[in-house]
């Protein structure tokens, strides 16, 4: 970037990430003298996320108009491909959770399905709000009750909300390729690989209010000039349905990561974990008390 602030008014997400990382490192190294700057940035994030929240609340109106025009002009069959996209995303996420995360959980001595049942209340909360942030306190509390040390939970869970967004990464790559195919844009294999790598990077920090992943998708598409940003309107109407699935995948991935890292660091009470997973009802009653 030409200056420290020029990426903020540009459309190159890689420059934004570079400045953000450098600023983050600088704030950590000078945390005592930069305390006021950190507080300012934290306070600034509140209205920024509120703006995004307002826009995403109004977005369904625009999506309704766009889908009504599409169906009215091209017929009901024109939305079948969108249904296939939602189905593909859900199937991909389920396979990722069951096969990939399930294998990781099995290797570390616990069952992915029992962990999901143990966290069922938090997962239902995420499903209802389409945002993983709403379940953060409950997940941290339950993982501590399941034998993970407080320090591991306090570090891994909040960090994972920004740097371990499995569902958002899957969504961004699928959505980008769908938009390219819908607009009949051919992407060579090297462009597809670059899109995947950029999505893996730009998905970091995509956590926020519900719909924040859609905003991050816009920044990712800006890196691939062949795909116009206007193509995002194609999937705007179904983003709500995919938002729920990506939030659930993110939460499950973060929960598995916390248990795994606690096990690696020898800060996991395995007996307490097995007791919690097999006696989840008793744990819930204790939490309520």
Image (cartoon, grey):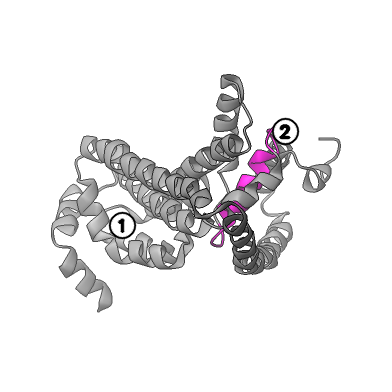
Residue 226 lies within the magenta run: yes
Between residues 140 and 84, which one lies in front from this camera angle? 84
Q: Are marks 2 and 1 in contact (CB under 8 Å)?
A: no
Q: Going 50% across and 55% down the picture, which residue do you hit?
A: 76
Question: Please, what secondary structure does the residue beneath circle 2 have?
Answer: loop
Nearer the viewer's eye, disc 2 or disc 1?
2
Instruction: In the rendered structure, find residue 225 and report the number of the disc placed on it.
Output: 2
Q: Is residue 60 above or below residue 217?
A: below
Badge count: 2
Answer with the quarter of the image where residue 122 lies: bottom left
| Residue that numbered label 1 is attached to | 143
Between residues 200 and 173, which one lies in front from this camera angle? 173
Residue 117 lies within the magenta run: no
Q: Position of residue 170 (x, y in %)?
A: 47, 41
Question: Please, what secondary structure does the residue beneath circle 1 have?
Answer: helix
Residues under labels 2 and 1: Cα distance?
43 Å
Tell me the quadrant of the picture where the C terminus can be found: bottom left
- Residues rendered magenta in the picture: 208-227
Dot placed on the residue nearer the N-terminal end, 2 or 1: 1
Asked whether the viewer can see residue 151, the reply is yes
């Amino acid at each position: 970037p030409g200056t420290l602030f020029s990426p903020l008014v540009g459309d190159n997400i890689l420059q934004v990430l570079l400045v953000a990382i450098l600023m983050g490192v600088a704030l950590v190294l000078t945390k005592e003298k930069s305390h006021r700057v950190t507080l300012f940035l934290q306070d600034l994030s509140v209205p920024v996320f509120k703006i995004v929240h307002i826009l995403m609340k109004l977005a369904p109106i625009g999506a309704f108009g766009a889908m009504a025009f599409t169906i009215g002009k091209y017929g009901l069959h024109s939305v079948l491909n969108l249904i296939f996209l939602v189905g593909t995303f859900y199937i991909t996420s389920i396979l990722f959770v069951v096969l990939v995360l399930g294998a990781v959980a099995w290797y570390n001595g616990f069952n992915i399905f029992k962990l999901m049942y143990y966290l069922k209340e938090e997962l239902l909360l995420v499903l209802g709000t389409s945002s993983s942030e709403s379940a953060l306190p409950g997940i941290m509390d339950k993982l501590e009750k399941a034998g993970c040390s407080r320090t591991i939970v306090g570090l891994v869970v909040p960090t994972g909300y920004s740097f371990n967004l499995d569902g958002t990464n899957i969504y961004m790559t699928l959505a980008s390729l769908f938009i390219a195919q819908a607009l009949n844009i051919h992407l060579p294999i090297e462009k597809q690989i670059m899109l995947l790598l950029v999505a893996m990077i730009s998905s970091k920090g995509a956590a926020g209010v519900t719909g924040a992943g859609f905003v991050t998708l816009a920044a990712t598409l800006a890196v691939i000039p062949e795909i116009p940003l206007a193509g995002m309107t194609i999937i705007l109407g179904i983003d709500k349905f995919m938002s729920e699935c990506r939030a659930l995948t993110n939460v499950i991935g973060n929960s598995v990561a916390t248990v795994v890292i606690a096990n690696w660091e020898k800060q996991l009470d395995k007996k307490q974990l097995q007791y919690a997973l097999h006696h989840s009802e008793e744990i819930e009653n204790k939490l309520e008390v």
